[in-house]
Image: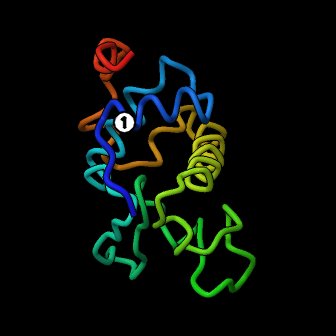
Amino acid sequence: GKVYNRCELAQELYFSHKFPMQDLATWVCIAEHESSLNTAAVGRLNADGSADHGLFQISDLYWCTHGGGSGGKGCHIDCDRLLDSDISDDVRCIKTIHEEHTRLSGDGFTAWTVYNGHCRQKTRADIASCF
C-alpha cells in the first residue's frame, strides 16, 4: 500500500483522475477520516459483519468481493485490489458509489458516514495550498 499526504492525493485525483476541483477537498477529507490516507487500510468489522477496504474504506457488503465470487458486487472488483498503491480501481469504484447514492439520496457523498460530521463543509480553500 501507500500512505498519501493530503496534497499528493488532491493532485492525483485532479490531474490523473480528472475529479472536479470543487469536490477535491471533500474526497481528501473522506480519505483522511476513513483510512488516514492509507491505501492498505482495512476497517474493523462493522455491526453487520462486513469490512471496509482501502483509501476510501469501500464496503464488502455491496461493492467488492473476496476471492472473485459473485462478480465483484457493485464495483466488479476483488476487495484486495482496493489495498494496493494504484488507486485507479478505487477511484472507479467511488465514482460508482457516488453516482448510485446521488441517484438514491441526491448527495453521493452521504454514502460515507464521515461526510456529514466531518467533510460536508469542506471547500476549495481547504486544498488551495496544494495547487
In the picture, residue 7 is in which quadrant? top left
Q: Is residue 25 left or right of residue 33?
A: right
Residue at the image point whose x is 47% and y is 38% from the top = 109
Residue at the image point whose x is 51% and y is 72% from the top = 60
Q: Is residue 55 left or right of residue 80?
A: left
Check the image and report above or below for 110 versus 10: below
Q: Can you say which quadrant of the picture contains the C terminus? A: top left
Residue at the image point whose x is 24% and y is 38% from the top = 117
Residue 78: % across, % down: 61, 74
Q: Can you say which quadrant of the picture contains the N terminus? A: bottom left
Residue at the image point whose x is 72% and y is 82% from the top = 70
Q: Nearer the viewer, residue 96 or 125?
A: 125
Q: Report the residue marked by disc 1.
A: 28
Q: Is residue 128 left or right of residue 12?
A: left
Q: Amino acid at mark 1?
A: Val
Label 1 SS: helix
Residue 26: % across, % down: 39, 30
